[in-house]
Image (spheres, rainbow, N blue to C red):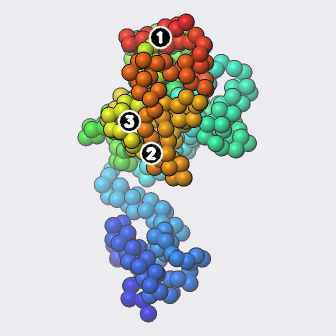
Amino acid sequence: MSSLPRISSPHHGRLNLEQLKKQAKALLRQLHTGAAPEYQTQLKRSPATLSDAQWLIARDNGFSTWPRLKAHIDAVDFAARHPDFTASDEANSCHWRCGNDIEHSLRLVGFKGRFQMMADPLCMGPVQALPLEAYRAQRSQYISQVFNLPLDDVQRRTNEEYDRLAQLGDAPGVLWCEADAYDQLFLVRALAGLDHLPQRLELVQTNAVPGVQRFIGIGQLAPDLLAWLWPQRQAVTAEALALARRTWAAYCAASPLALADIADAEHPCLPLLAPALRRQLQQLPGMQDGLSLTERLALQTLLEAGEMSCGRVFAELMAVREPLPYLGDIMFHVMMRPLIEGARPLLVETETHLDWPHRPLRLTDLGRRVLAGEAYWPDHADAPRWIGGVCIQPRQPHWAMREDGRPVWRG
């Protein structure tokens, strides 16, 4: 007979997540020693994992999964801390986000509206002013290729996302954005697609949160902070709509000059836009080394630290070096592949049997020369690079970025 007591809720109904985690670990030990046969019979595999033990604990407490149990505990804790908070959104409203990182938190806080996500990383790959069908096909082909995803699945998701985005003005809507290029490009794309200013469309955006030393994005915040941000939302104005249309056209253009003009100005109607555009323009090749800022920061990290795993390089960028973080880990890995896989690579990747975050990286001799400005990366690269509608073809004249932040034609 197992010595582990059945887990039951205390009389006041408040579950303690830390206690439940300890109980799951204790149950796992018993499952491994055969001391909990009444639980073992409920499992379909052996040996049991921690996820199995957590599932059993959740079942004992009336939940079908461990995540559902955790979500319940989070919701009860939030309600206890904020007894007077009531989200003022409506059941027919829609919360828009370029990712699903706040969906759970919105539900937890008590928002009633639907959640819609657009995951297309507009900060990467070709983004041109094409007819809608051709535009979707181009984005789908790029995403499928660089992220190694089935094209049919990507096309279906892309069409669903853009079909939903076309309904942005049909109901009260709220756009949740931070200050980086991923979010701000999503914002201008969403607004630029509107035929007219909706009767009710609001924007929640921030570039800093008190008490957060290294603010990266809304998704890192506790649910309490979404309740704090909510009263700060502002209505999208006609001026913002016009700016978004102008910005989107500039981003899709084959020349970066119009985008640079927008980035050089201040825009009170969308105050976080210009800094994000300035950072995105830094993905153009630098005049001296031909590297994007992301590439340069990664190579500098390896030059200073020596051999390091790709995951640690990414962590260093996010924690310290990147001035306006906008990449996810897989997006960063995609950006590193051309530096690794070309005929004349800048990086050597070893232990390729490991998952990519754990594979060690080190600079090649060419990588050191490029970083020192003694060689120019597009003269050795194999793959084209896109920044919106601007295409950088290897060994051909192209747009580049001067140190003063202005793009110039490099013949």
Mark 1 vs mark 2: in front? 2
Q: Which residue is mark 1?
A: 407
Circle 3 crowding by C-alpha within 10 Å: few under 14, some 14–19, many from 20 = some
Residue 293, given in percent of the width and then of the height, sits at: 43, 25
Which residue is disc 3 drawn over? 302
For the point 54% across and 44% down, which residue is it?
A: 115
Q: Are marks 3 and 1 in contact (CB under 8 Å)?
A: no
Q: Amino acid at mark 1?
A: Pro
Label whose residue precedes the other's in the sequence (1 or 2): 2
x, y percent for residue 9: 39, 75
User: Which is nearer the N-term, disc 2 or disc 3?
Assistant: 3
The residue that label 2 is drawn on is 360
Decide which of 228, 411 is in the foreground and name it.
Answer: 411
Q: Nearer the viewer, residue 68 or 335?
A: 335
Q: Is residue 391 visible?
A: no
Residue 13 placed where, x, y %? 37, 71
User: Which residue corresponds to the image point at 44% horizontal and 22% vertical from the top-left?
Assistant: 370
Residue at 39% x, 84% y: name it: 4
315 vs 167, left or right, is left
Please state which amino acid type lies under the numbered disc 2. Pro
Looking at the image, tell me whether mark 3 or mark 1 is earlier in sequence order: 3
Q: CA distance from mark 2 to mark 3?
A: 10 Å
Q: Is residue 275 above or below residue 358?
A: above
Amino acid at the residue labelled 3: Leu
Q: Extreme front residue here? A: 365
Label 3 to label 1: alpha-carbon separation:
27 Å
